[in-house]
Image (cartoon, rainbow, N blue to C red):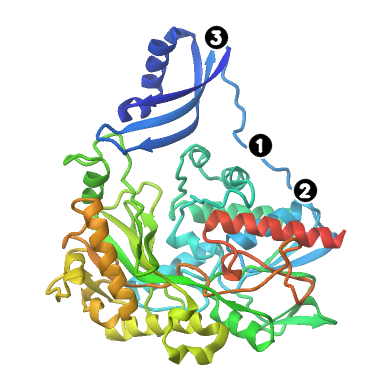
Amino acid sequence: MIQELQLRVNPRTAASMGEIAQYLAKHNDISVDSIQGIRILKRSIDARQRNVVVNLKVRVYVDEPMMQDYLVPPIDYKPVDGKRQAIVVGMGPGGLFAALRLIELGVKPIVLERGKDVMRRRIDASRIQREGIVDPESNYCYGEGGAGAYSDGKLYTRSKKRGSVDRVLGIFVQHGAREDILVDAHPHIGSDKLPGVIKAMRETILRCGGEVHFETRVTRLLVKDSTVTGVETAGGESFAGPVILATGHSARDVYQMLNDSDITLEAKGIAVGVRLEHPQRIIDQIQYHSVLGRGDYLPAAEYNFVTQVDHRGVYSFCMCPGGFVVPAVSEVDGLVVNGMSPSTRGSHWANSGMVVELHPEDLPDQYKKYGVLSMMHFQQDMERRAFVEAGNTLIAGAQRMKDFVDGKPSRNIPPSSYLPGVQPSRLDLWMPPFVATRLRKGFKLFGKNARGFLTNDAIVIGVETRTSSPLRIPRDNELLHHVTLEGLYPCGEGAGYAGGIVSSAIDGERCAEALAATLK
């Protein structure tokens, strides 16, 4: 007999298959000896009350052997040698999943990535951290795997209406990710494990006859009779075929190229602010309602805060429990920070972006001259100001959280996970007032809702600006191609249609399907 059951158990029970078996036997009139196997299908933590419980959905095999089935069946990728080809520009999640979906649909993908492969890219990311040396083509934003490879690793998304989240997670598992990501309510691979998964995905593309070209920066779209027929690269090479443009939210030169080519663009809202870092023990104590923190059986706690201040959202973004703050720079004269978590989530710190929603009309008049690129230039100016305030270094400006709220200088800064280092800085004064003022008010509200959250043991580090694309490339709602040019499929975060690894992957698959349909 096979049964699927919903359980609410304490963290200790949830951490052990033996304990779960004992619980099932006690509450379901089943002998422990008759249980041949247990498979966890879904897992989530309910920490709303003082007594934390874990919700489990389990499949129990009673008096019959446990089947070695798949939660999501693997995909059989077949060769595409000699098939019609399409160009995929960018090798983040949007581009990777577009390429894999093209193979499924019998189209040969030619993937062009401006940065390096994910393993060589690790060296360049390390040089940023340890030496302050930024390679504009290989960094935390550019290279195989995209911005999420070394500065994220989280797979939670609310974009479930756009496509199958389980399908995307299943493809990650097929390429080496732990099956836990199909089970956990907030799945996470980890920035230490994700590069290996990305490499395996690239190997699938190559094994099936697709092509991958690294250090190949696209500089021009080739257009004939209002149809995109291919691309040209900085090295003078040309590649022919319809184009999926999946260049990510930080490729400012691509936005400039599109604007100079009279491609229709739209300014869109973004969110900017700071990276907030607490000792993880404080977040554990707050979220698990215990001075003892998480204990032996609970993971590093997460949080999610959102409020409205002066008609704009103020909220936490990309929360990284047990993580690190990293320099997510892609330009030599800017400073921007992000967060990442390793698979163990084992560091002493918790961090998140704390950001303020901005609309194009919120910007000062000086940005109107940039038209649709106004938000992009505002982003860039914030990063350059942070760099100057840091003495033209990547030693980031920081301020204790309560000092920031109270408008006081911080004479010293507590230890931080940010490896280049932090230094005292008056972020409350030099950040744009319409950002800093809303952040201060938001922090006060969050502190009221979660006692202990607003503390000088936490620091704000500046600046966090790369939360999303500063513009959108309009596209047909059904065919997903650009409304003014056939053969161009703007994709993922960089096109303004996604907001993370999973949603970008889903969008990449949809763009591949739309492109393949036109080839047929």
Q: Is residue 331 visible?
A: no
Q: Which mark is first along the chain, 1 or 3? A: 3
Within 10 Å of the Cα at label 3, are there few (<14), some (14-19), or many (20+) other Cα atoms?
some
Q: Which quadrant is home to the N terminus?
A: top right
Marks 3 and 1 sit apart, C-alpha to C-alpha, by 25 Å
- Provide the secondary structure element on which disc 2 rests: loop
Compared with 21, 102 (above or below) is: below
User: Extreme right residue here?
Assistant: 520
**Which residue occupies 31% across, 86% down?**
388
Marks 1 and 2 sit apart, C-alpha to C-alpha, by 16 Å
Q: Which quadrant is home to the C terminus?
A: bottom right
Within 10 Å of the Cα at label 2, are there few (<14), some (14-19), or many (20+) other Cα atoms?
some
Quick one: 102 or 440, which is closer to the camera?
A: 440
Disc 3 to disc 2: CB gap under 8 Å: no
Apparent side of residue 384 relative to residue 217 in the rendered image (left or right): left
Task: Locate residue 85, reporting x and y percent.
Answer: 80, 64
Task: Locate residue 475, reporting x and y percent.
Answer: 70, 69
**Disc 2: which residue:** 78
Which of discs 3 and 2 lies nearer the camera? The answer is 3
Quick one: 122 or 315, which is closer to the camera?
A: 315
Disc 3 to disc 1: CB gap under 8 Å: no
Residue type, numbered disc 2 = Lys
**Which residue occupies 57% across, 61% down?**
498
**Disc 1: which residue:** 73
**Disc 3: which residue:** 63
